[in-house]
Amino acid sequence: MNLKEAAAKHALKYVESGMTLGLGSGSTTSIFIDLLGARFSARELTDIQAVPTSEATAERARKWGIPLTNLSEHPTMDLAVDGADEVDPNLNLIKGLGRAALREKIIASHAKRFVVIVDQSKIVDRLGRGPLPVEIVQFEHGTQIRWLNSSGCTADLWLEEDGSPVVTDNGNYLARCWFENGIDDPYKLSLALSTRPGIVEHGLFLDMADIIVIAGNDGVRTMERK
């Protein structure tokens, strides 16, 4: 069993029959959905519904026959499960390299508990080891890239292999922000990004995760918000 699978399998312990679940996006969450689907198909879990965070997640859940719903029908979910790109000692996250941070943040904010599944490589002392995704509107997107580059980071427009801009499920572009020595103050940065016209959302998930499931070579451990 690889580390991603080990983390995903452990997260299944938090799922009970009758729950409404938020299902995240990305490689580790895809494994979780497959494990969840297998248990659902075997009727080891019954009467579950799920709100997907991306079209790819919705398609994967449908393949297993997992019933899909939405926040209009279930404004408060029992549990949301998702991966992360970085996790710091305060359980703060960077997410969004799977191109779905906006929907992931919406879903996580409507869950009673938010469980994050990662392998040991995603644990960092300070956020910003890798890029921070920022979702921006297409209109005059160059102004957002210039502004980001003047805000203490190096930013670029995320491009596909053919040179075209990455487009999210919401029809927006994505920028990536690189920080030479990590992010000094994630809360200050989050506020600045959130109040900038033209920036739709960013990949800083602060004070949101309740449980971090971490798979390492020595086994699986958890970090919980007190």
Image: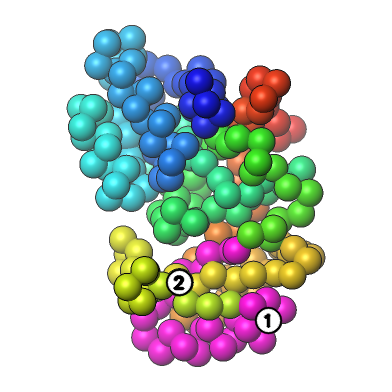
Q: Relative to residue 99, is residue 42 depicted above or below?
A: above
In the picture, the quarter occupied by the C terminus is top right
Residue 41 horizontal side relative to residue 179, left or right: left
Q: Residue at x 23, y 27 (%)?
A: 64
Whether residue 2 is visible here, answered yes or no, is yes
Residue 223 horizontal side relative to residue 106, left or right: right
Q: Which residue is drawn at 44% across and 37% down?
A: 29
Extent of the magenta region:
131-154
Could you say where residue 48 lies in the image, as x and y percent from the top left? 31, 24
- Reading the chain from its start, which is encountered first: label 2 or label 1? 1
- Look at mark 1 in the image and give the residue it sits on: 151
Q: Quadrant of residue 87?
A: top right
Residue in front for this viewpoint, 179 or 55: 179
Instruction: Name the amino acid, label 2.
Output: Trp
Residue in front for this viewpoint, 112 or 142: 142
- Crowdedness near tag 2: few (<14), some (14–19) or many (≥20) residues, C-alpha within 10 Å: some
Residue in front for this viewpoint, 166 or 223: 166
Determine if the magenta segment contains residue 134.
yes
Whether residue 224 is visible here, answered yes or no, is no
Determine if the magenta segment contains residue 129.
no
